[in-house]
Amino acid sequence: MPAPTGRYAVGEDVLHLTDTSRLDPWNPSAGYRQLTVSMFYPARQGTGRPAPYMSAGEAQNFVALRVPPGFGITADAVEALQTHAFAGASAAHGKFPLIVLSPGLENPRATLTSVATDLASRGYVVALVGHPYEDSGEQLADGSIAPCLWCNQNGADPASDEQLVASRGVDVKFVVDQLTRDHVWDLSHLIDKHSIGMAGHSAGGAAAAAAMEADPRIKAGVNLDGTFLPAVPAGALGDRAFMVFGKQSDHVEGDAPYLDPTWGATWADLTGYKRWFAVSGEAHASFTDIAALAEEAGMPVPGQTLDGFRSIQITRDYVAGFFDEILKGKPSSLTDGDSAAYPEVAEQP
């Protein structure tokens, strides 16, 4: 994976959290809702041991569900990917804003590792949330792998997309509740409880808005190429900041490239600080690790013409720049408008 760009090394822990206030919405027979969360944090250089990209079971399910046959990619290779994060690393000194990340539907949490490690290296604590039964497989506390019921495995009957987004909003609020309590994570003292943001890809991007509606502690949100389901009600986020960051479609309607209609509807109703950027040459998966991994494996990503590593660089810089501006009070030239450094990115609308 691409190396982080910040000044800190990156530590990683994996937490297993159980929300005893509700049954799992997609598999009630499993009992209370369980979440698997990868915690990335600023760490001291030279400490800890390399962290795997996924567990062995997660990698097996990911290859089976998400990798087309014929490319020779094995679960062992996926598990062994170098992430630039170190398990058990000694934490850096200080307090840091908390960023919650949520992946797209069918993609496990690991597919946002590049964004997570980069944010941690720049001085953020990152909670990368796995939403069981919604992706290729998250490993639960007992070591089992939760299958993708939303992928119509095991005869499941998935609920509507809007229900899924709303459920993720509840997941995220629970995670924030847990992480802001001192006894849940050994390194909770690193978190600045008054400086919290959220970003997500696809369904996770829509969930960023849903989580902000449910939790006023989240001061800033980023939607990476996700359809808003439903559109955010007018004024629902108050004066809090939000960024929409997505692909620039090659499909033209009228005189302009097609853009997701929910973006325009939501944009008009956002009443706080807001930014909207579209990236040419990217596909829906370009905002995740999949862009770079597919390129290295020789797998085409339909719709993507931009270099996969360039895609990750763009996403990481704009996401970090936005959160730096809102949560750290550091002005970012990237969020001012079009940037000479990134001609692929155009300010909208």
Image (cartoon, helix red, strand yellow):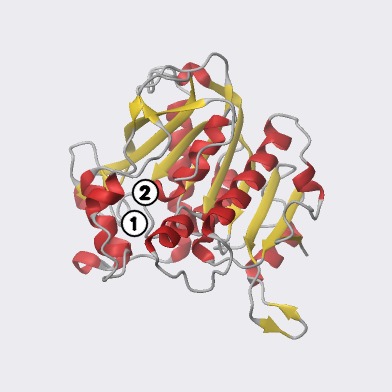
Residue found at the very far top of the displayed protein: 93
Q: Could you give the CA–CA distance between mark 1 and mark 2, rounded to whole angstroms?
A: 7 Å
- Residue drawn at point x = 42 percent, y = 17 percent: 90
Note whether 232 is above or below 113 in the view shown.
below
| Amino acid type at image mark 1 | Asp
SS at badge 2: loop
Q: Is residue 233 left or right of residue 81?
A: right
Relative height, residue 178 to residue 339 (above, below): above
Q: Nearer the viewer, residue 123 or 75?
A: 75
Q: Which mark is residue 118?
A: none
The N terminus lies in quadrant: top left
Nearer to me, 327 or 229:
327
Q: Mark 1 and 2 residues: CB-CB less than 8 Å, in contact?
A: yes
Q: Residue beneath label 2, please? A: 131
Where residue 163 appears, as percent x and y from the top left, is 44, 59
Q: Which residue is mark 1?
A: 135
Would you say residue 272 is visible in this rendering? Answer: no
Q: Amino acid at mark 2?
A: His
Report the mark closest to the observer, 1 or 2: 1
Q: Residues within 10 Å of mark 1 (few under 14, many from 20)?
A: many
Q: Is residue 294 left or right of residue 76?
A: right
Q: Is residue 119 visible?
A: yes
**Residue at disc 1, secondary structure:** loop
Q: Residue at x 59, y 44 (%)?
A: 212
